[in-house]
């Protein structure tokens, strides 16, 4: 299993333990792939998972360009699944994997926002 897929599996398990309902993994909606799409109470949550080995936390890899792409994909997903009435939130789960140790998980709730008006 690739490092990215391993991280997504860890993140899905972690979020389920926090009460999130997983709607999809690796959801492809033009122009992007969303790692995890979940429900947290009455919010639609798109979760970007970043996994690395070593000391650096990987959350910096969620650039403004990536955020804009995820927003467009999430908006289309909400339209296609008749979920536009729900608040939309973006979380980031950063995972560091160390050989011989338990993975470290950092969850950033409401990690970024997109301007909903033009």
Image (tube, rainbow, N blue to C red):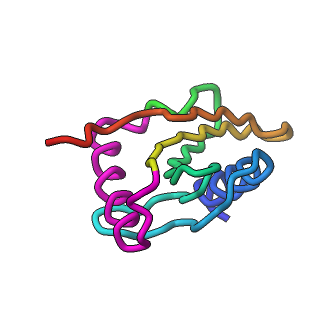
Q: Is residue 108 left or right of residue 114?
A: right
Magenta-colored stretch includes residue 40: no
Q: Quadrant of the N terminus?
A: bottom right
Residue 84's quadrant in the figure?
bottom left
Query: Residue 94: where, in percent of width, then height?
Result: 60, 37
Q: Is residue 19 above or below residue 58?
A: below
Q: Is residue 78 magenta?
A: yes
Q: Residue furthest bottom?
A: 80
**Which residue extends farthest top?**
55
Q: Residue at x 80, y 49 (%)?
A: 17
Q: Position of residue 93 (x, y in %)?
A: 60, 41
Lateral position of residue 107 relative to residue 47, left or right: right
Query: What is the number of callouts on the image?
Result: 0
Residue pictured at 35% horizontal, 61% vertical: 32
Q: Could you say which quadrant of the image residue 25 lies in?
A: bottom right
Q: Magenta segment range?
A: 61-86
Q: Quadrant of the C terminus?
A: top left
Q: Position of residue 18 (x, y in %)?
A: 76, 45
Classified by dominant secondary structure, the portion drawn in magenta counts as helix
Q: Nearer the viewer, residue 75 or 101?
A: 75
Single out the residue that lies furthest toward the front.
Answer: 85
Work out whether residue 40 or residue 58 is closer to the camera in this orientation and state it. Answer: 40
Q: Is residue 77 above or below residue 74?
A: below
**Residue occupying image coordinates x 47% and y 43%:** 90
Residue 38 x %, y %: 59, 57
Which residue shows up at 83% across the image and 39% down it? 102
* Residue farthest left in this picture: 118
């Amino acid at each position: 299993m690739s490092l990215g897929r391993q991280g997504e599996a860890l993140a899905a398990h972690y979020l389920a333990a926090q009460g999130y309902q997983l709607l999809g993994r690796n959801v492809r909606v033009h122009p992007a792939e969303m790692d995890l799409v979940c429900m947290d109470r009455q919010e639609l949550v798109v979760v970007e998972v970043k996994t690395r080995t070593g000391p650096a936390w990987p959350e910096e890899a969620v650039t403004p360009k990536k955020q804009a792409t995820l927003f467009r994909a999430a908006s289309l997903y909400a339209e296609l699944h008749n979920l536009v009435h729900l608040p939309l939130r973006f979380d980031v789960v950063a995972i560091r994997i160390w050989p011989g140790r338990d993975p470290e998980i950092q969850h950033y709730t409401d990690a970024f926002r997109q301007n909903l008006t033009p």
